[in-house]
Image (cartoon, rainbow, N blue to C red):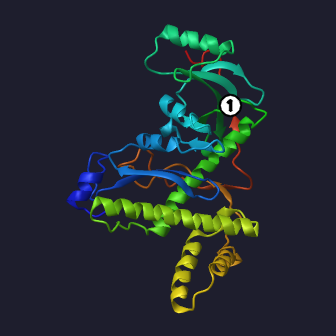
């Protein structure tokens, strides 16, 4: 946003990497649907606010019908409990170094484990909680929770070890392989962010507001506009029997913009007729992409000056394959690998 004293005081400049950015920046943390990319909940603050802190305000907006997936940067014991209080099921990636206490193996290759509160409990208290979990007694969720662990690798990504924990404990409800494939859909959130920041706002474009209050309004206006466009895409795709992923977002933006200019140039039409025409244009074959190819690419960046990821190498090549990503479940932990 514009470099003004008011914006700097409210939002601050990002100082990651040892130097400050040229412009003040706002941070947005959001929950979005994987299929439609629609942002259903969001919170906005200055760049001084951490993602985990902002996410706490979103967990209470979850509902029992939701399955929330999250990257490993969002996991903590308090965050897990806060999200579970909403009644939604969770499927979160955790650091491979996290060692939950093993309880028993399950038939689908996953295993049940208990995670105790990392701070504020003596070792004797943790031992009593683990013994209670082994005996099947109820646990106080403020001190310990039972989770289901799925360890797997994706050979297309050079055997990267991925560890998921979920609140869905019954393998009959969903298998470990299905959970692993489901987690890969979390990357659809990146597509939604690209739609919002690149195609809707414009690449590298600075917001117009020179004071904080209009800046907040402008950010929420972009979020609401993106939600409305995703709603239009999802409705049109459902009506035409298509996957919402196949509808072109940029093409839909142009259709909506043209409808505004057409309304000014031609006599107004009934709202129902205008909505029906928009659905037809959005789902028209010229605005529909071919079926998505399954592909993967090494996680890398062009420059690593401010990123923890490695720099892109000339040998990095994208991988395309006919079906969904292959998943190889890892064996359940041995006695030496189980949590202390």
Residue drawn at x 53%, y 31% as measured from the top left: 81
Q: Is residue 266 left or right of residue 15?
A: right
Q: Is residue 318 above or below residue 328?
A: below
Residue pointed to by mark 1: 330
Q: Residue furthest bottom?
A: 266
Which is more toward the observer, 97 or 169? 169
Q: Is residue 335 above or below residue 96?
A: above
Which is more toward the observer, 322 or 314? 322
Residue drawn at x 68%, y 69% as measured from the top left: 236
Q: Is residue 44 visible?
A: yes
Q: Is residue 82 above or below residue 188?
A: above
The x and y percentages for residue 328 are 70, 37
Quarter of the N terminus within the rendering: bottom left
Q: Is residue 327 left or right of residue 55?
A: right
Residue drawn at x 62%, y 68% as measured from the top left: 232
Quarter of the C terminus within the rendering: top right
Q: Is residue 72 left or right of residue 48?
A: right
Q: Quadrant of residue 249?
A: bottom right
How crowded pointer 1 is (Cα within 10 Å; few <14, some 14-19, many 20+) is rated as some
Q: Is residue 147 left or right of residue 98?
A: right
Q: Is residue 152 above or below residue 27?
A: above
The x and y percentages for residue 75 are 51, 35
Q: Residue furthest front?
A: 270
The x and y percentages for residue 101 are 60, 19
Which is more toward the observer, 82 or 152? 82
Q: How many marks?
A: 1
Q: Is residue 290 visible?
A: no
Q: Residue furthest left?
A: 5
Which is more toward the observer, 57 or 167? 57
The x and y percentages for residue 250 are 55, 72
Residue drawn at x 54%, y 86% as measured from the top left: 263
């Amino acid at each position: 946003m514009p470099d003004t004293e008011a914006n700097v005081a409210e939002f601050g400049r990002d100082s990651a990497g040892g130097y400050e950015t040229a412009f003040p920046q706002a941070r947005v943390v959001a929950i979005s649907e994987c299929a439609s990319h629609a942002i259903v909940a969001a919170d906005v603050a200055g760049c001084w606010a951490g993602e985990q802190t902002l996410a706490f305000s979103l967990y209470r907006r979850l509902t029992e019908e939701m399955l929330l997936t999250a990257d490993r940067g969002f996991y903590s014991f308090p965050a897990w409990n806060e999200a579970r209080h909403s009644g939604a099921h969770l499927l979160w990636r955790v650091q491979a170094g996290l060692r939950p206490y093993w309880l028993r193996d399950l038939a689908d290759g996953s295993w049940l484990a208990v995670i105790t509160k990392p701070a504020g409990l003596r070792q004797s208290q943790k031992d009593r909680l683990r013994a209670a979990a082994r005996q099947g007694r109820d646990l106080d969720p403020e001190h310990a929770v039972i989770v289901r662990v799925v360890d797997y690798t994706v050979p297309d990504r050079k055997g990267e070890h991925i560890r998921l924990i979920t609140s869905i404990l019954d393998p009959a409800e969903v298998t470990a392989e299905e959970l692993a494939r489901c987690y890969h859909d979390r990357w659809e959130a990146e597509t939604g962010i690209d739609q919002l920041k690149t195609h809707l706002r414009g690449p590298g474009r600075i917001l117009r507001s020179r004071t904080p209050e209009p800046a907040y309004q402008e950010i929420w206006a972009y979020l609401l506009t993106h939600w409305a466009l995703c709603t239009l895409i999802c409705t049109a795709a459902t009506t035409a029997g298509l996957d919402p992923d196949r509808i072109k977002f940029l093409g839909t933006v142009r259709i909506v913009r043209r409808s505004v200019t057409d309304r000014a140039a031609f006599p107004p039409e009934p709202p129902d007729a205008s909505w029906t025409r928009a659905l037809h244009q959005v789902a028209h074959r010229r605005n529909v992409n071919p079926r998505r190819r399954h592909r993967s690419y090494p996680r890398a960046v062009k420059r690593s000056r401010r990123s923890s990821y490695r720099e892109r190498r000339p040998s990095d090549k994208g991988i395309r394959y006919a079906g969904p990503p292959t998943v190889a479940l890892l064996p359940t932990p041995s006695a030496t690998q189980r949590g202390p």
